[in-house]
Amino acid sequence: MSLNIKMVTTSEIILAIIIVALSVVMPIYYYYQRKKNPKQDNKAQDNPEIKNYIDRINQITRNKHK
């Protein structure tokens, strides 16, 4: 049995480095972007009906635990 070992080319190494770098950098970028503009995450609470519903549930829960 002979092992067929292929050498990794320079372009494959560069491609692997780019993929690893992007997989590290992109989540950090999106985390800081979301942290800078938190209003985008709370679009559901802009609707007054949903806000009233959430407030009612919170009030019921508070009354149960008194």
Image (cartoon, rainbow, N blue to C red):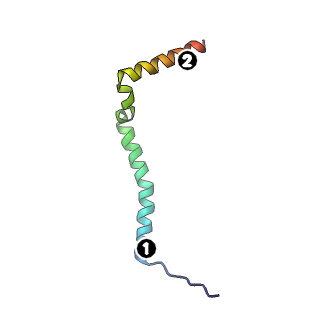
Residue for point 39% across, 31% down: 42
- Residue 39 placement (x, y as % from top left): 35, 32
Q: Name the one closer to the observer, 47 or 23.
A: 47
Residue designated by label 1:
12
1 and 2 marks in contact (CB < 8 Å): no
* Amino acid on which disc 1 is placed: Glu
Eyeballing the image, is 34 above or below 25?
A: above
Q: Amino acid at mark 2?
A: Thr
Q: Quadrant of the C terminus?
A: top right
Q: Which residue is mark 2?
A: 61
SS at badge 1? helix
Tell me: residue 30, above or below residue 19. above
Q: Secondary structure at mark 2?
A: helix
Mark 2 Cα-neighbour bin, 10 Å: few <14, some 14–19, many ≥20 = few
For residue 3, side relative to residue 31 (left or right): right
Residue 65 place in picture, x, y as percent: 60, 15
Write down the quadrant of residue 25 in the picture: bottom left
C-alpha span from label 1 to label 2: 57 Å
